[in-house]
């Protein structure tokens, strides 16, 4: 059992190394949600998911590689990124179990994570003082 744990841990580390390397080579700017890990660890369900993914460790690895490749990792505050409509800004409250963002105000329908990703990008661009990186 101990051997298996070590093997899985090594595979995960290897995967995260390759993924962070590839992302840092591909993108000049990478925006991530600056999750407040300490608070989230108090929630048992979230704690397991975060622990499994090793989000904090992954972001640190990614940040290091971005710097080495002349890029930048930008940590964006997570407040309301999944609630706010990425199109019109309307706050659409939803439980964690609701996976689709449906805005009654402007009609936008997006996967919850996609909507949040757009908000994170917008937040990152504000931090960078840019309106677009395209
Ligand atoms: Zn909307």
Image (cartoon, rainbow, N blue to C red):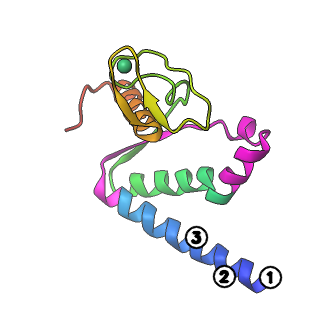
Q: Is residue 123 above or below residue 70?
A: above
The quarter of the picture where residue 123 lies is top left
Q: Nearer the viewer, residue 89 or 65?
A: 89
**Magenta highlight range:** 24-51
Q: Residues within 10 Å of mark 1 (few under 14, many from 20)?
A: few
Residue 58 percent location from the top left of the image: 55, 56
Q: Is residue 62 left or right of residue 37?
A: left
Asked whether mark 1 lies closer than 8 Å to ligand 1, one says no
Q: Nearer the viewer, residue 64 or 50?
A: 50
Contact (Cβ within 8 Å) of mark 1 with mark 2: no
Residue sitting at x 38%, y 35%: 110
Which SS class for mark 3?
helix
For disc 1, the marked residue is 2
For disc 3, the marked residue is 13
User: Farthest residue toward the bottom?
Assistant: 3
Residue sitting at x 80%, y 82%: 2
For disc 2, the marked residue is 7
Asked whether mark 3 lies closer than 8 Å to ligand 1, one says no
Q: Is residue 118 left or right of residue 55?
A: left
User: For residue 129: magenta?
Assistant: no
Residue 93 percent location from the top left of the image: 55, 21
- Estimate the spatial distance between the alpha carbons at disc 2 and disc 3, rounded to whole Å: 10 Å
Q: Nearer the viewer, residue 91 or 74?
A: 91
Q: Is residue 84 left or right of residue 110?
A: right
- Estimate the spatial distance between the alpha carbons at disc 1 and disc 2, rounded to whole Å: 9 Å
Residue sitting at x 80%, y 39%: 42
């Amino acid at each position: 059992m101990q051997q298996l744990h070590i093997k899985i841990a090594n595979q995960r580390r290897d995967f995260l190394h390759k993924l962070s390397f590839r992302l840092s080579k591909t993108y000049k700017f990478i925006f991530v949600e600056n999750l407040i890990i300490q608070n989230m660890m108090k929630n048992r369900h979230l704690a397991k998911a975060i622990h499994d993914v090793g989000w904090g460790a992954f972001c640190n690895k990614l940040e290091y590689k971005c710097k080495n490749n002349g890029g930048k990792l930008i940590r964006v505050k997570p407040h309301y990124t999944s609630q706010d409509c990425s199109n019109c800004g309307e706050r659409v409250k939803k439980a964690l179990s609701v996976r689709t963002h449906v805005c009654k105000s402007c009609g936008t329908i997006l996967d919850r994570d996609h909507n949040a990703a757009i908000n994170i990008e917008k937040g990152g661009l504000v931090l960078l003082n840019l309106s677009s990186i395209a």
